[in-house]
Image (tube, helix red, strand yellow):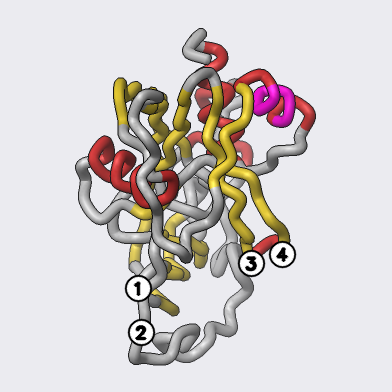
Amino acid sequence: MSAQTLNEPLNEPLNEPLNEPLNEPLTQPGSSADLGTGLAGSSALAPIERLEEDRVYANPWVSVFFDRVALPGGAIARWNRIQVGQHDGVAVLPVRAQRIGLVAQYRYAISAVSMEIPRGFGDTDDHRSEALRELAEETGSRPGEVIALGGVHPDNGILDSLVHLFLVEVDEDAPLAPVEAHEPPTFWLPIDDVVAQVASGSITDAFTVAAVGRARLRGLI
């Protein structure tokens, strides 16, 4: 996924900071005696109603909300929510000649190089096409069979994003196309080596762990 150049400053709040505590009720909840003792009566399973959407920060990639909500017990609270991109994301597990393609990407948020499958924000709701675009951009691969592995919520406690996973059988007879100089390098590693790194915790990228795990459980790799 290529970076974009902006003419406006980033990391500027859209309004004044809020003084209320984060994710804490503004009014007292109802009595816990109203809750059932079984799973069906658990307040943790009841929906939280959004009363007012309050976007406190945004840039072209991320929006941060501090919404006013009604909790199941009747309390009114503020709740954090982060929206990433305007469309669902995609991540691709590329397989070529019994090897998996992983990109070595420096991730600023964790201050480390991460070995991971190609991924990116979607520009449309055509998830399959978006996945193939990311694959071509990052690895120069020509796709063969494409298998949907389902979606994952990266952190459903605060992120509202859904990322669609795909396994792509790369045409091993076709040469890999050159990629842009700014793209991270791709390493084609034996499938069993990648599975072992996922199992040991050496690979920590959540999308890679999920895609490799699902593909292995389904007998695809």
CA distance separating discs 4 and 1: 22 Å
- First to last magenta residue range: 193-197
Residue at left 27%, top 40%?
127
Residue at left 34%, top 91%?
7
Secondary element at image label 1:
loop
The numbered disc on residue 6 is 2
Q: What residue did someone put label 3 on?
A: 108
Q: What residue did someone put label 1 on?
A: 60
> Which of pointers 1 and 3 lies earlier in the amino acid sequence?
1
Query: What is the three-letter code of the residue carrying label 3?
Result: Tyr
Which quarter of the picture shows residue 151?
top left
**Tags 1 and 2 in contact by the CB under 8 Å rule?**
yes
Query: What is the three-letter code of the residue carrying label 4?
Result: Ser
**Residue in the foreground of this view, choosing between 91 and 190:** 190
Asked if the stretch drawn in magenta spans residue 194, the answer is yes
Q: Nearer the viewer, mark 4 or mark 1?
A: 4
CA distance separating discs 1 and 2: 9 Å
CA distance separating discs 1 and 3: 18 Å
* Residue 187 image position (x, y, % from top left): 59, 40
- The crowd level at tag 1 (other Cα within 10 Å; few <14, some 14-19, many 20+) is few
Secondary element at image label 2:
loop
**Tags 4 and 1 in contact by the CB under 8 Å rule?**
no
Q: Is residue 137 above or below residue 169?
A: below
